Amino acid sequence: MKKIGILGSTGSIGSQTLEIIDLHDELEVVAITANKSVDKVFEQCLKYKPELVAMMDEQSAIELALKLQEIEVKDKKIENIKVLGGMEGLIAVAVYEPIDVLVTAVVGMIGLIPTVEAIKAKKTIALANKETLVTAGEIIMPMAKEYGVKILPVDSEHSAIYQSLVGQSLDKIEKVVLTASGGPFRGKTNKELREVKLEDALKHPNWEMGAKITIDSSTLMNKGLEVIEAKWLFDVTTEQIDVVVHPESILHSMVMYIDGSCIGQMGLPDMKLPIQYALFEGERKNMPYERLNLSQIGSLTFEEPNRKTFKCLDLAFKSIKIGKEIPTVLNAANEKAVELFLEKKIKYLDIPKIIENAINTYVKTKYNKEKKLTIDMILETEKWAHNFVVESII
């Protein structure tokens, strides 16, 4: 029996992880976390009976514990569920001794410290939290190597590259090619994007995702963040990473080798496959879902990304080339800018302008390439970027 812990069990990736667990008797959920979704976690507790649960919001932890105590039907497993709160609770789940694979599916920087502690506890990591490698890849990957920990990508693009590397050596890579759907505004010009409405930006053509990641997909920032992740996951330079727009989202990414061979992974746009591949650490298991039928699809399209219109992609390349805490500036400024766009406080095209301004200001006023990157520096930089963005629009 493989025991699974999930950081972020109520989000998109966490919920789909539970769907995969439902398919396989050899997988068991032993620990889960969420933020404030008390009712949803309560239902998960009744169904999966995890041994340990943590709510980031401490009041929600109290509410969940009370709901579990009030259950009339007696069930020892439910009675014995331990409920914790706050960051200490998340860390307790991350290092929980029975866990074999920890799925890090929380959104945002909240996942960074629990992931660090999980690595120290020698847990295999199924990584879905972008911020971990975007902001701290320089720290995380050497740490994983030191502790002998496997980091298995859950993102469909990185999973595709990971699968395409089976039986191959990293030093034989010429390029990794990340595919992007192009989002809802593929082919649009700057002029056409000036009056984009929030509702339009939230209509992704292929994937069902949360609001923040859907906006990131539309600006190509999501692909930019994946470029940074790929650099650390596969130990490649930015010059070895290409991005190509592929609107059908069938070829999820590929590797080009030094002999000219290209090996990629294809499948329908569904996150369950990469999740299952990570949970079973690369072992293939049956999945009772629809299969890819190329004859029905007919043709696949590939295009160069429009970097002049979608400037976030080049901002990501710029940030990782400067290095250290600059990807944290990129990530945090984008996070706050997207939040403001979702609140209809800024326009769509303000997002890349705000991010670029934050990066340039930080480099001029605070950046020191001689400083050693630390977790504390990353967290301080995140606060600076959030404050800078808010103050810049007042």
Image: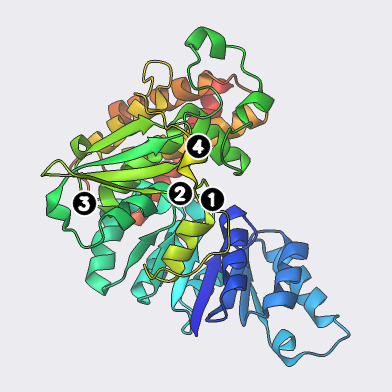
- Asked if disc 1 and disc 3 are in contact, CB closer than 8 Å, the reply is no
Picture residue at 44% right of the left edge, 51% below the top:
155
Residues at marks 2 and 4, CA–CA distance in whole angstroms: 12 Å
Picture residue at 39% right of the left edge, 74% below the top:
123
Label located before the other in sequence (1 or 3)? 3
Name the secondary structure under disc 4: helix
Residues at marks 3 and 2, CA–CA distance in whole angstroms: 25 Å
- Name the amino acid type tagged 4: Ile
- Name the amino acid type tagged 2: Gly
Instruction: Point out the frontmost of discs 3 and 4.
Output: 4
Residues at marks 1 and 2, CA–CA distance in whole angstroms: 8 Å
Measured as percent of width and height from the top left, residue 317 is found at 29, 32
Q: Is residue 322 above or below residue 82?
A: above
- Asked if disc 3 and disc 4 are in contact, CB closer than 8 Å, the reply is no
Name the secondary structure under disc 3: loop
Residue pointed to by mark 2: 267
Q: Residues within 10 Å of mark 3 (few under 14, many from 20)?
A: some
Label located before the other in sequence (2 or 4)? 2
Q: Residues within 10 Å of mark 2 (few under 14, many from 20)?
A: some
Measured as percent of width and height from the top left, residue 156 is found at 44, 50
28 displayed left or right of 246: right
- Asked if disc 1 and disc 2 are in contact, CB closer than 8 Å, the reply is yes
Name the secondary structure under disc 2: loop
Front residue of this view, candidates 122 and 257: 257
- Name the amino acid type tagged 1: Asp
Picture residue at 51% right of the left edge, 49% below the top:
108
Residues at marks 4 and 1, CA–CA distance in whole angstroms: 16 Å
Residue pointed to by mark 3: 235
Residue pointed to by mark 4: 297
Label located before the other in sequence (4 or 1)? 1
- Name the amino acid type tagged 3: Asp
Residue pointed to by mark 1: 270
